[in-house]
Image: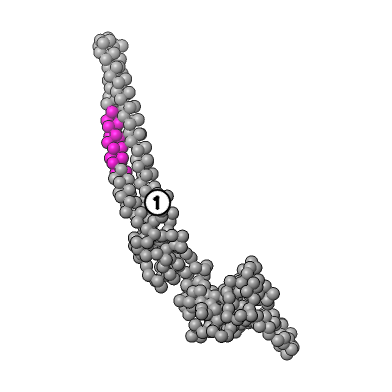
């Protein structure tokens, strides 16, 4: 039977301890009052039991394969680049899909098209520059012929011919400039296709969305990646105990309280601090070994940040309840 977590909260004690600690931190002016309060009768601590589990910060991430618009029946895993228990960094390649082969071919083709478009544009620009130079020369020649005609030093026929050549040169230059502009637009179009194919190729790779540890693998090379995903990832540098506290007991728990988690699966108890009370009441998920326990109880989840995450880094989803007895996590306001 899977062990589960059992947690107790020292609620009344926490209400008494927190004011005492605050008074001690005020200074000498509050010293006598704090001393008198310390002599006052102390209320008995009330134990609050709760089942729970151990999780990495942010919970367990199930990493799936990127969607494949062109795939009819899904993608097939062709390579897994990590193992269970391996630590990974955000962006690190985890796995590769079969669509990568086609994607790489498309990227290579589109890259070649970009290079071709750039060469064509360069050639068209060179031709346009030459045409513009010829048009400029023809224009100057036509203006010179017109001046000579005005002085009676050339014939009207020569002047008309020069003017015609200038007009033809100007038209040719404009046409070549237009062709160069079109060639430049072809570069932009080819680069857009190249970028799209690069993005499509990237969808063939499964990368780590965050730093963490690979907790489990759901697919092997040669298998179709389904809705279950590729692997599980957890940020085990921060570990939490998630306590399911009965809604009738949640008033005894608050952030800042210290907690103690014990389990037969742990070599020693774990300590931590209540960091957050989740703002939702729902049915209990964790079912213990007590046949008399309420299976339809309404609970509130409490996040307890563990002081030594390394001690629980390999115990994700551990539900530490010893067989035959329920162990406890004690919540206190001032310390364990």
In magenta stretch: residue 188 = no
Determine the residue located farthest toward the front in the rendered image.
291
Q: Which residue lies furthest to the bottom in this view?
A: 39
Q: Which colour scheme is used?
A: one colour
Q: Quadrant of residue 276?
A: bottom right
Which residue appears at 27% of the width and 36% of the height?
A: 123
- Answer left or right for 80 relative to 306: left
* SS for callout 1: loop
Image quarter of the C terminus = bottom right
In this figure, which residue is indicated by the disc labeled 1?
Answer: 71
Query: Of helix, strand and loop, which mostly describes the magenta segment?
Result: helix
- State left or right for residue 166 relative to residue 295: left
Q: Residue at x 31, y 29 (%)?
A: 176
- Label 1 crowd (10 A; few <14 / some 14-19 / many >=20): few
225 to 137, vertically: above or below:
below
Above or below, 162 relative to 269: above
Whether the magenta-drawn stretch holds residue 129 is answered as yes
Tell me which residue sits at (54%, 84%) in the image.
323
Specify the segment rendered in magenta.
114-132
Q: Which of 180 and 296 is in front in this view?
A: 296
Tell me residue 278's x, y (percent): 62, 68
Q: Position of residue 169 (x, y in %)?
A: 29, 23
Residue 268 seen in this snapshot: yes
Give the residue at x 27% y 30%. 130
Up the image or down, 294 lies above or below 134; here it is below
- Taking the image as drawn, is residue 26 in sight? no
**Residue 24 coordinates in the image, percent (x, y):** 67, 83
Left or right: 163 in relation to 11: left
């Amino acid at each position: 039977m899977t062990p589960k977590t059992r947690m107790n909260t020292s609620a009344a004690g926490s209400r008494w301890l927190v004011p005492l600690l605050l008074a001690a931190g005020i200074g000498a002016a509050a010293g006598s009052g704090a001393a008198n309060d310390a002599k006052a009768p102390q209320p008995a601590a009330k134990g609050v039991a709760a089942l729970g589990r151990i999780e990495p910060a942010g919970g367990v991430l199930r990493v799936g394969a990127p969607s494949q618009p062109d795939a009819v029946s899904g993608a097939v895993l062709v390579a897994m680049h990590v193992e269970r228990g391996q630590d990974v960094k955000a962006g690190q390649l985890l796995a590769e899909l079969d669509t990568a082969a086609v994607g790489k071919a498309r990227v290579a083709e589109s890259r070649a098209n970009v290079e071709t478009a750039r060469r064509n544009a360069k050639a068209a620009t060179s031709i346009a520059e030459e045409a513009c130079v010829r048009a400029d020369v023809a224009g100057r020649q036509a203006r010179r012929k017109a001046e000579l005609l005005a002085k009676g030093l050339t014939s009207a026929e020569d002047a008309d011919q020069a003017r015609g050549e200038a007009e033809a040169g100007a038209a040719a230059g404009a046409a070549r400039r237009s062709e160069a502009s079109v060639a430049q637009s072809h570069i932009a179009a080819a680069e857009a296709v190249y970028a799209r194919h690069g993005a499509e190729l990237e969808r063939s790779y499964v990368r780590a969305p965050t730093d963490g540890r690979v907790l489990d693998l759901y697919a092997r090379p040669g298998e179709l990646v389904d809705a279950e995903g590729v692997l599980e990832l957890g940020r085990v540098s921060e570990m939490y105990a998630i306590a399911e506290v009965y809604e009738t007991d949640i008033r005894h728990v608050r952030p800042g309280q210290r907690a103690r988690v014990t389990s037969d699966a742990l070599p020693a108890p774990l300590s931590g601090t209540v960091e957050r009370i989740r703002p939702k009441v729902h049915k209990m998920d964790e079912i213990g070994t007590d046949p008399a326990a309420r299976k339809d109880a309404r609970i509130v989840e409490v996040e307890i940040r563990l002081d030594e995450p390394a001690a629980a880094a390999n115990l994700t989803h551990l539900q530490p309840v010893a067989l035959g007895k329920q162990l406890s996590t004690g919540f206190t306001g001032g310390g364990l």
